[in-house]
Image (cartoon, rainbow, N blue to C red):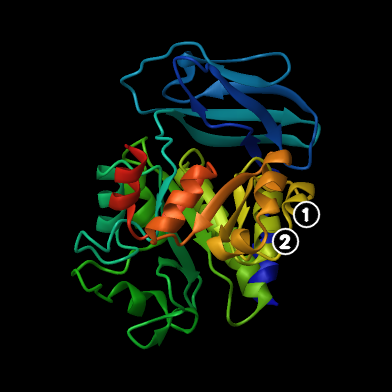
Amino acid sequence: MALLSDAFAQQKSKIYLSGYTYSTKQKTIGEVKVSGNSKINNITIGGADAASFKISKNNILSVSKVNSDVQSLEITLTAKTSAGSQTAGFKIVNDQFIHNKVIAHRGAWKNTGASENSVSALQHAIDMGCEGAEFDVHMSADSALFIHHDDAIQGKDIEKTDAQTLAALKLANGENLPTLADYMQAGMKQNKTKLILEIKPSAISKERAIALTHKVMDAVRTLKAEAWVDYISFDYEVCLEIMKLAPYAKVAYLKGDKTPAELAAAHFYGLDYHYSALQKNPAWIKEARDNKLTINVWTVNDEAVMDWLIKENADFITTNEPELLLKKLKK
């Protein structure tokens, strides 16, 4: 039980926000909260850009000075509660994120020559103006985080292979197998394309899947990447754990075996189902809308299915053909 024990041992009261972005039209960022819903007695703003922010009596953080040329601002927040003080750093991002439905599945790789789930595939998705780039995260035998779709790469089971061995592997385009930090740091150089992070189920145990989830969430906090990252998983318990660790995270479920009403009751942001699930259950589209869930659909490469989902006004369409989908949406 060491993995799970270690993950929970690292838990302590943490500061989080209900939002991490601002714009010229939206100066309110969100509420400052402490995990466990402890009552906050006082909040202090520090850091390089502290002068650009203010905090209200009811703990609402807002930006007082907006420079549209700045991509992000950095602050620290110290929250005092009866249990003591907690301090955390945040990047608050100038919200110029694109809204055009297009999620590049494993990045934009199929027509670009990039390897799927590579940093260059991410960069191609950014360059072509996709709303998001989806990528998959596994955990090595020694608890390092790597980006790859399948459980194994070049005959090596990721969960049973050490980080040093995995880090030395080359993708088909010559890049190294990226770590989660490599990938997210590349994505955080811009503020147009979201990072759609899929936490992969563990083939070994549920315990490892939960430990992976904690590792991912710790990495996002450490990198101050909250504004860029939305989450998806086929593992329902993983999704619930994400929401437990980051109550305002945007989380969507992939497996397709829950009704929209069930997801809404569990406080999901959205559903992210294979298109066949919605073809078999067309009423789920309206049910999702009625329950204020976003609708993402994967993996849509067929033109007729794209046209149907555009007509149904799906919020997001995940595809290996982002160029084609972008072209359709511009008509």
x and y percentages locating residue 189 in the rendered image: 31, 40
Query: Which label sits on residue 262?
Result: 1
Residue for badge 2: 258
Q: Is residue 137 above or below residue 104?
A: below
Residue 85 is drawn in which quadrant? top right
Judge by depth and name the residue closer to the eye, 127 or 111: 111
Judge from the rendering whether residue 85 lies leftward or rightward of residue 250; answer left or right: right
Judge whether 214 appears above or below 162 on screen: above
Q: Which amino acid type is marked by label 1?
A: Glu
| Measured Cα–Cα span from mark 1 to mark 2 | 6 Å
Give percent across and percent down for residue 139: 49, 71
Circle 1 SS class: helix
Side of 240 where 312 appears, left or right: left
Can residue 12 be seen here? The reply is no
Q: What's the amino acid at mark 2?
A: Lys
Element assignment for label 2: loop
Whether residue 52 sits left or right of residue 18 in the image: it is left
